[in-house]
Amino acid sequence: NAGVTQTPKFQVLKTGQSMTLQCAQDMNHNSMYWYRQDPGMGLRLIYYSASEGTTDKGEVPNGYNVSRLNKREFSLRLESAAPSQTSVYFCASRQAQGGNEKLFFGSGTQLSVL
Amino acid sequence: AQSVTQLDSHVSVSEGTPVLLRCNYSSSYSPSLFWYVQHPNKGLQLLLKYTSAATLVKGINGFEAEFKKSETSFHLTKPSAHMSDAAEYFCVVRAPNFNKFYFGSGTKLNVKP
């Protein structure tokens, strides 16, 4: 039961560097999400994908791009990292069958941009 | 537009006393509402959810929440706090027919022995 798998768990970047956060789910869910968590601000939605082949902006999309590669995988790319992107990033997928709705979360990626 | 406001950033209770974590929501529709818990250095876990069935919702670990439409509230309660309840709690809203989940800013619950 892998659930939602995120890589890497930790990453340190220098300002201006790029990187891609990987996320995969093995539960056949249609919808997937990327959130960032900052102290005192809860989780804020960066991008989401309602189904394979579609993506849409969330609350804080600036500085990020996403790719829904297939039904399993949803990656988040930082093209030119900035210190303001230092955060903990969570990927999630949505179980929507019947009345049993819930989000499944990955274990998070702690990103520091120096 | 949907949003949630968690009225307290920190709540401190003694073990064995009641817990009340407050959440107010704003939604143009009848929303789905959730409470998630995050223990230190752990992922997020669903505590309970409201999806327009019973207004009093029971969750895991003795938690429950009541949906009050007139007050646009979905407060989380537990009759007797346990040390293991110390964590951060998030109220979450989703409008029907929309795929976006909006999180509140979180309430950190401290449980004193």
Image (spheres, coloured by chain):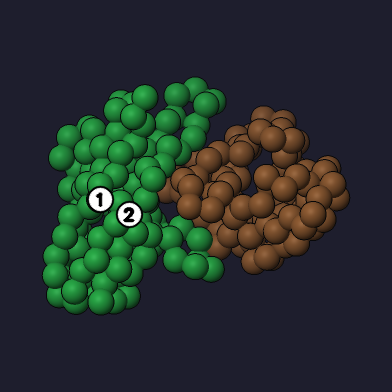
Chain colours: A green, B brown
Residue B59 falls in which quadrant of the image?
Answer: top right
- Residue A8: which numbered mark, if any? 1
Residue at 30% x, 33% y: name it: A25
**Mark 2 Cα within 10 Å, few/some/many (few <14, many 20+)?**
many
Residue at 54 percent of width and 25 percent of height = A99
Badge 2 and badge 1 both on one subunit = yes
* In this view, A81 is above or below A27: below
Distance between mark 2 and mark 1 Cα atoms: 6 Å
Q: Quick check: A99 above or below B97?
A: above
* Residue B101 coordinates in the image, percent (x, y): 46, 48
The vertical placement of A65 against A48, above or below, is below
Q: Secondary structure at mark 2?
A: strand
Disc 2 + disc 1, Cβ < 8 Å: yes
Q: Is residue B90 left or right of residue A10?
A: right
- Residue carrying label 2: A109
The image shows residue A14 at horizontal and vertical percentages of 19, 74
Note whether residue A11 is visible: yes
Name the image quarter holding residue B54. Answer: top right
Identify the residue at the far front of this view. B113
10 Å crowding of disc 1: few (<14), some (14-19), many (20+): some
Inspect the image, locate mark 1, and give the three-letter code of the amino acid beneath it: Pro
Please state which of residues B35 and B15 is positioned toward the viewer in this rendering. B15
User: Residue B5 at what x, y percent from top left?
Assistant: 62, 62
At a point 74% along the width and 55% down the height, the residue shown is B111
Q: Chain of mark 1?
A: A
Camera-side residue of B70 and A105: A105
